[in-house]
Image (tube, grey):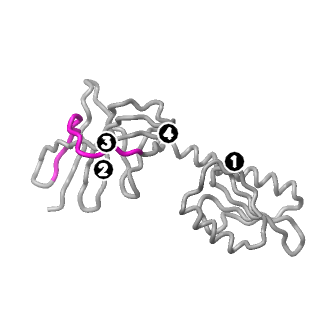
Amino acid sequence: MTCSTEKKPPTSAWLKADKKRTAMNEGRFKIVSDDYTATIYTAENNLQQPVAIFYQGRQTKPKKVQAYLTEDQRDDAIKKFIDECKKQKSDSFFSNENIEIGQVFYTSWGYDQTNVEHYKVIGLIGKTMVEIVEIGTLKEHQDIDYGTCLPAVDNVIGKPIRRKVHRWKDKASIRMDYVRTAFFLEKDEEGNYLSKSWSSYR
């Protein structure tokens, strides 16, 4: 049995995890938060005590398994767990209200070399999403394989893409993929963008 108030369809990754969890908890009552951040199965142990098995997000291993003296205690714990999971999700995103059209973000990544890319904000979507486009990077060589670089703001080289705004040290960041995160590129007192260091594998 499932108790759920769904507002939007879950992702395929969540459904895959949920299928595995359900198989492991066959016959138990399932509670799913409306944003899919929390899944709880309820049952009784050998002492006939109320038990709750807690999963967060797409976890397939319980975050905790807890027995309670009364069902009211278990219900309170379930509500608290759902609220905590929702808060963690909301805290991981960052409002786009302080982001302006035209602002530049940069990525800096690599193992044996440092790649720098620049992106310009061209739209604000909802409260936590931006539309960005990659722009060119002007490199200055300090040697054959390293130097500094600045954004070429008017040189659009990519197609518009949409990404969620995340929180990084109380500032906005944009997670491009599993490897790259774009950070806000600050300016100096004269309004010029600060340069970033790049390097290449010789």
Q: In this view, does 69 lie above or below 133?
A: below
Viewer-closest of 159 and 20: 159
Report the residue at 66% width, 62% height from top.
Answer: 55
Which mark lies nearer to you, 3 or 2?
3
Secondary structure at badge 2 equals: strand
For label 2, the crowd category at 10 Å Cα-Cα, with few meaning under 14, some 14 to 19 and many 20 or more, is: some
Which disc is residue 128 wearing?
A: 4
> Could you tell me which quadrant the N terminus lies in?
bottom right
**Amino acid type, mark 2:** Ser
Q: Is residue 136 magenta?
A: no
How many angstroms separate mark 2 from mark 1 (CA)? 35 Å
> Could you tell me which quadrant the C terminus lies in?
bottom left
Which mark lies nearer to you, 3 or 1?
3
Q: In which quarter of the image is residue 121?
A: top left
Q: Which of marks 3 and 2 is nearer the N terminus?
A: 2
Q: Earlier in the sequence, mark 1 or mark 4?
A: 1
How many angstroms separate mark 3 from mark 2 (CA)? 16 Å
Q: Do the residues labelled 3 and 4 touch (CB within 8 Å)?
A: no
Q: Name the residue under label 1.
A: 83
Q: Name the residue under label 2.
A: 108
How many angstroms separate mark 1 from mark 4 (CA)? 20 Å
How many angstroms separate mark 3 from mark 4 (CA)? 17 Å
Magenta stretch secondary structure, dominant? strand
Q: Name the residue under label 3.
A: 133
